[in-house]
Image (cartoon, rainbow, N blue to C red):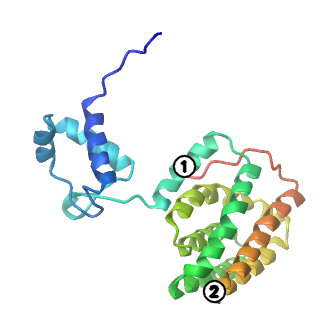
């Protein structure tokens, strides 16, 4: 039997791994200040440049952030922070519209049902505001794709289920912008989208879980039907998400 020779980890990775372990164990909590570089260097028995490199790795992963006075504090990564990276990974795997749509069909109706159960009045109002802003965008002849993405993200936030939010965010970041080429080629698409959004929000507002789930499911099925009607390929890889400017 052959064994692969073990490779020692660089010191900075050991530093970042130990700090991450303490964060995940709850010994270091979100909002709590991280000890200074000097304190960490003394504690780990390494130089400050090694600590600095380990900290940079944790910042890039969203586990640390700079607070006032440039002091580092523990951060809980938000779904919106993690989604672009996960969406790029999906795009690099060349996932297709069909694959993303299948996941959306499972998650979006669930999110609507949970939103009808848990949404606060302010969250329902935010959803209604998105519909009103979409009306204004359409009246100007502009694309509603960004607001459509926002609408579905708000429904998921109103569901108050962190596992669901983290699961659907990267899928939504890729799937809903894919509707952009569909809108100009299918004149009725915008009206159908807005009608479905209104039904979903009305059901959420009256705590109608079955109704919210039903209308969201119809909306997601309709999205795929429109994609087919304009001749877009369901098995083609989706475009990677645009990087923010």
Please give left or right for residue 227 compared with residue 38 in the image.
right
Decide if residue 140 is in sight here.
Answer: no
Q: CA distance from mark 2 to mark 1?
A: 32 Å
In front: 151, or 139? 151
Tell me where residue 41 appears, x and y as whole percent: 14, 40
Which image quadrant for residue 210? bottom right
Which image quadrant for residue 202? bottom right
Please give the residue where the numbered disc 2 appears in the rendered image: 207
Please give the residue where the numbered disc 1 appears in the rendered image: 86
Helix or strand or loop: what does disc 2 sit on?
Answer: loop
The answer to which of marks 2 and 1 sits earlier in the sequence is: 1
> What residue do we see at 64% from left, 55% from top?
174
Up-down relation of residue 95 to residue 214 (above or below): above
Disc tally is 2
Q: Residues within 10 Å of mark 1 (few under 14, many from 20)?
A: some
Tell me where residue 24 appears, x and y as whole percent: 34, 52
In front: 17, or 187? 17
Helix or strand or loop: what does disc 1 sit on?
Answer: helix
> What residue do we see at 77% from left, 51% from top?
98
Up-down relation of residue 27 to residue 149 (above or below): above
Tell me where residue 81 appears, x and y as whole percent: 46, 57
Q: Residues within 10 Å of mark 2 (few under 14, many from 20)?
A: some
Tell me where residue 103 appears, x and y as whole percent: 69, 56
């Amino acid at each position: 039997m052959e064994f692969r020779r073990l490779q020692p980890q660089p010191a900075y990775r050991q530093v970042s791994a130990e700090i991450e372990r303490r964060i995940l164990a709850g010994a270091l909590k979100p909002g709590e200040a991280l000890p200074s570089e000097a304190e960490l260097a003394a504690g780990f028995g390494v130089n400050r440049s090694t600590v600095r490199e380990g900290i940079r790795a944790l910042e890039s992963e969203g586990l640390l952030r700079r607070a006032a006075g440039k002091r580092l504090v523990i951060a809980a990564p938000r779904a919106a922070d993690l989604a672009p990276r996960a969406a790029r990974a999906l795009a690099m795997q060349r996932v297709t519209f069909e694959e993303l749509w299948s996941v959306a069909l499972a998650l979006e109706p669930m999110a609507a049902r949970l939103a009808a159960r848990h949404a606060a009045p302010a969250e329902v109002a935010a959803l209604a505001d998105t519909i009103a802003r979409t009306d204004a965008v359409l009246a100007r002849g502009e694309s509603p794709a960004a607001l459509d993405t926002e609408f579905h993200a708000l429904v998921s936030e109103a569901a108050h289920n962190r596992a669901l939010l983290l699961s659907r965010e990267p899928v939504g970041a890729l799937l809903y912008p894919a509707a952009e080429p569909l809108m100009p080629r299918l004149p009725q698409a915008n009206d159908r989208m807005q009608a479905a959004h209104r039904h979903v929000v009305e059901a959420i507002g009256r705590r109608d879980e079955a109704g919210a789930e039903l209308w969201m499911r119809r909306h997601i099925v309709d999205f795929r039907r429109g994609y087919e009607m304009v001749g877009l390929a369901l098995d083609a890889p989706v475009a990677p998400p645009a990087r923010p400017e």
